Image: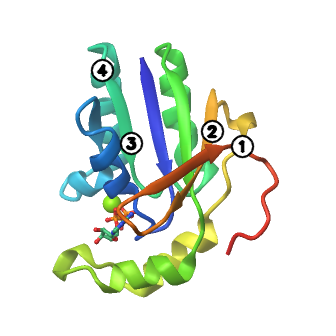
């Protein structure tokens, strides 16, 4: 069993990453699909629990920006015996804004939302309970470069 958390700004490429790497193997959970739910966070936890109990591999595709947002998911995954893995997307504000600007209609988010996420964003850490962390660079050429985690990384921003 496996629970993957994607962590990154709007426009960083999380959903694209899911579609290209995990769509055929992992169940998809996202609060984006629960906009009309009265308790999206609770519902999302329930969906993750159901999928893991069925033995599915699961990806949670939200910004998952703060430790607080991640903690219940991590705790749930560990309680059910899943390996909890985080994919942290490089903070590249200019590219996130550019990709977002190219999106159509409702898929485009207000720019202030990106800045608000940046403000909340806390880089993940093994102390949160992750079994494994990866660093993801979106190369914009239909591809993603995934590298091993380094707790101190320079040149981001
Ligand atoms: N590697 C890539 N090559 C080309 N285009 C990309 C790549 N990654 C993302 N894009 C494009 O950039 C836009 C944003 O990507 P995506 O929707 O995956 O971001 P996201 O992190 O899921 O954002 P959100 O948090 O708002 O859901 C999309 O229009 C997508 O098609
Ligand atoms: Mg997305």
Q: Which residue is mark 4?
A: 56
Is residue 39 among what the camera can see? no
Locate residue 92, reporting x and y percent: 57, 74
Residue at 35% from the left image edge and 79% from the top image edge: 100
Marks 1 and 2 sit apart, C-alpha to C-alpha, by 8 Å
Q: Residue furthest front?
A: 141
Q: Nearer the viewer, mark 1 or mark 2?
A: 2
What residue sits 53% from the left and 70% below the top? 117
| Nearer-N-terminus badge (2/4) | 4
User: How far is disc 4 from disc 1 in space, using C-alphas?
Assistant: 25 Å
Cα–Cα gap, marks 1 and 3: 17 Å
Name the residue carrying label 1: 125
Q: What is the secondary structure assignment of the residue under circle 3?
A: strand
The answer to whether marks 1 and 2 mark residues whose Cβ atoms lie closer than 8 Å is yes
Q: Which residue is mark 3?
A: 60
Q: Position of residue 139 (x, y in %)?
A: 48, 65
Kindly report which numbered mark, 2 or 4, lies closer to the viewer in this rendering: 2
Q: Quadrant of residue 28?
A: top left
Instruction: Please tell me whether mark 1 sits on a helix, a strand or a loop.
Output: loop
Q: Which residue is mark 2?
A: 133
Q: Callout 2: 10 Å neighbours few (<14), some, many (20+)?
A: many
Q: Residue 15 falls in which quadrant of the image?
A: bottom left
- Residue at the spot 28% in from the left edge and 22% down from the top edge: 50
Give the CA distance from mark 3 to mark 2: 14 Å
């Amino acid at each position: 069993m496996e629970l993957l958390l994607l962590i990154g700004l709007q426009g960083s490429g999380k959903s694209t990453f899911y579609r290209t790497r995990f769509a055929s193997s992992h169940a998809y959970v996202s609060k984006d699909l629960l906009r009309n739910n009265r308790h999206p966070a609770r519902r999302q936890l329930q969906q993750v629990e159901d999928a893991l109990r069925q033995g599915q591999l699961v990806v949670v595709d939200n910004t998952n920006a703060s430790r607080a947002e991640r903690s219940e998911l991590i705790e749930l995954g560990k309680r059910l015996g899943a390996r909890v893995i985080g994919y942290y997307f490089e903070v590249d504000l200019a590219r996130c804004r550019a990709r977002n600007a190219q999106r159509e209609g409702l898929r485009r988010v207000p720019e202030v939302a990106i800045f608000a996420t940046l403000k909340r964003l806390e880089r993940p850490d093994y102390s949160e309970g992750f079994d494994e962390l990866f660093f993801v660079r979106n190369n914009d050429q239909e591809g993603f470069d995934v590298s091993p985690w380094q707790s101190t990384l320079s040149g981001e921003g």
